[in-house]
Amino acid sequence: MNVVGKSRKHLRLLAGLIMGLVAVLLFIGISISFGIVDISMLTVVEAFLEFDGSREHLIISTTRLPRALIAAAVGACLAVAGAMTQALTRNPLAAPDLLGINHGAALLVVLSLFLVGGHNLTLYAWAAFLGAGAVSILVFLLGSAGRGGMTPLKLTLAGVSVTTLLSASTQSILIFHERSLDEMRFWLAGSVVGRDLALLVQVLPFMTAGLLLAFFLSREVDTLQLGDDVAKSLGQPTKMVRTLAFISVVLLSGSSVAVAGPIGFVGLAVPHLVRSIVGKDHRWIFSYSAVAGAALLLLADVAARFILDNQELPVGVMTAIIGAPFFIYLARRRVHKL
Amino acid sequence: MRGEMMNRRPTTLFALLILLAIAFFMANIGAGEYELSLWEVVQTLFGLGSGEHSFIVNTLRLPRALIAFLVGAGLAVSGAILQGITSNPLASPGVIGLNAGASLAAVLVIVALPAVPLGFLPPAAFAGALLAAILTYWLGWKEGSSMYRIILVGVGVSAIAQAFITIIMMSGKIMLVTQALIWMTGSVYGRGWEHFYALLPWMILFLPLAFLLSRQLNLLQLGDDVSKGLGSKIEWVRGGLILVSVALAAASVATAGTVYFVGLMAPHIARRLFGPSHTTLLPASALTGGLLVLASDFVGRTIAAPVELPCGLITAMIGAPYFIYLLLTENKKSGKM
């Protein structure tokens, strides 16, 4: 491709990205205005410009805004984490959960429930973050043990085995401790409801660090996709790149699971969609993933309020119900050569 | 010379595994709240025991032990076939949506429709498994089947079923939810002759069929191009193998719930012990899987008695560390696996 063609393609992608960002802002607006009490868009804008302490404005600032922002942030982080995991394992079926992050988080949340008891979202958040971190380190060590160092397949297998062991442990607690199960089944479904803005602010540094690290690595990740041998001969310190990439996944999905519980499917499906639009350049894959992930989770969260009359569905359920049919469609349309 | 060793080893190993299976079988029948000695077990099995022993053995423990073995064998062979067709060491009956379909049906019966008698659970789960597998195969079909596409579609189908499971589990009564969770973990608790006789025909029909097709499975592994060159029946052979695999797994899961990990792990153990050729691998997987579930059920019944742990938990707790061991030793020899 000549230089002009390339820069034109970049311009087109940039325009698409900006449109995506506008869509995300619009979805945030929609998410704030629709609910049990409908609030007009005008009031939403007013609440930001001149807050007057009225009932509508209070609803916006205490419940609706945190919910929308958390959905957007978590969606973006999960999608980028998914894109990074798929690049790291060179496996299009990999999701951040493969590295044991959700299951590590779940086990520690169950343990904290079992030992401390009670409904405390902040406690869950820290337990989840700690569990996600500890377990991913274990997976990392197992996946890079042995002579060849970390290979995509070894990392995948290490993830599967650790994940299985953890989920059996979690299940054994849940089966024998009914009270934990009663509380846990809601956490396990994944949700962005009822979280404080303060919680988001606490994990925001980790999320930002993870996102920056991912973008910083995007060129190196491109090279890594050519295979270890090629990357090494181009002078890339592959071990270092893998380690940093792994850290960014842990930061991104660890903070997401801490805030919202284990939300599946975004991390698996969004990168697939994005790659079919932007191709193989990870700078674009990551930025489009962030935007598309935020949009999907916002949309799922809005839809979750309207499916059932008297009850909200957890957003984790909605992402699968919206995302999976699309994913199947994509698999049918795009996988023909394999 | 190496070939000679490989030829001699399997027979000894087979004999050893069979002996182990018989040992766990006897132990399973002997152990429990009412302990029986080995001699008493043997006597009762041959119809010479006292009336009380006969009730404990023939009504309570014998069908359960038989079911444990058959379920393990069915899941393991099913997994071995799928790993063979996909050439993917991560494949298991779960990847074609089967487990999620069975679970959704079971959760529906247990939690959402508690009025339905539990006798309907196995046929419902069987139907759920079958439906999900058919849906996956059908959606994955496009001018011929591609296993990669089928797996991707299976992921999607599983995710949708899982979403509905989550909804039901969140809104159900907690006692019923616990029951459903135990079913999904996999357990042979309280299974009797009626379950055994429902399971047996499937195993009698499809296990030998799987063994018969094992040569074809070897050919399929050479890749589509090569195996097509050897004969153009590839779609039929693959379809037939998938059918066998689905029938075995669906019947097993309907009987014992989604016993975790056996379908994934038993073939790996068998492959390590007996080598990759499917003519030995499939029978070896059956034996390994059966032994694994029998042993897990024995451990689950005795380790925390009088409380019983579902055998599905134990298979995962034995299975995962084994997998890690496999990982750490295998890659020293070659990065392949």
Image (tube, rainbow, N blue to C red):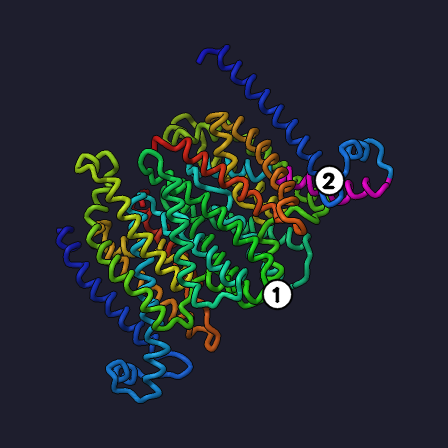
A250, B140: nearer the viewer: B140
Q: Quadrant of residue B322?
A: bottom left
Q: Amino acid at mark 1?
A: Arg
Q: Residue at x 28, y 83 (%)?
A: B44
Q: Residues within 10 Å of mark 2 (few under 14, many from 20)?
A: many
Q: Quadrant of residue B260?
A: bottom left
Q: Chain of mark 2?
A: A
Mark 1, secondary structure of its residue: helix
User: Residue A127 in magenta?
Assistant: no
Q: Please, is residue A46 above or below residue B58 in the view?
A: above
Hey, which residue is sitting farthest bottom in the picture? Answer: B50
Q: Residue at x 33, y 85 (%)?
A: B53
Q: Residue at x 56, y 56 (%)?
A: B168
Magenta span of residues: A53-74
Give the residue at mark 1. A179
Q: Residues within 10 Å of mark 1 (few under 14, many from 20)?
A: some
Residue B73 image position (x, y, % from top left): 30, 61
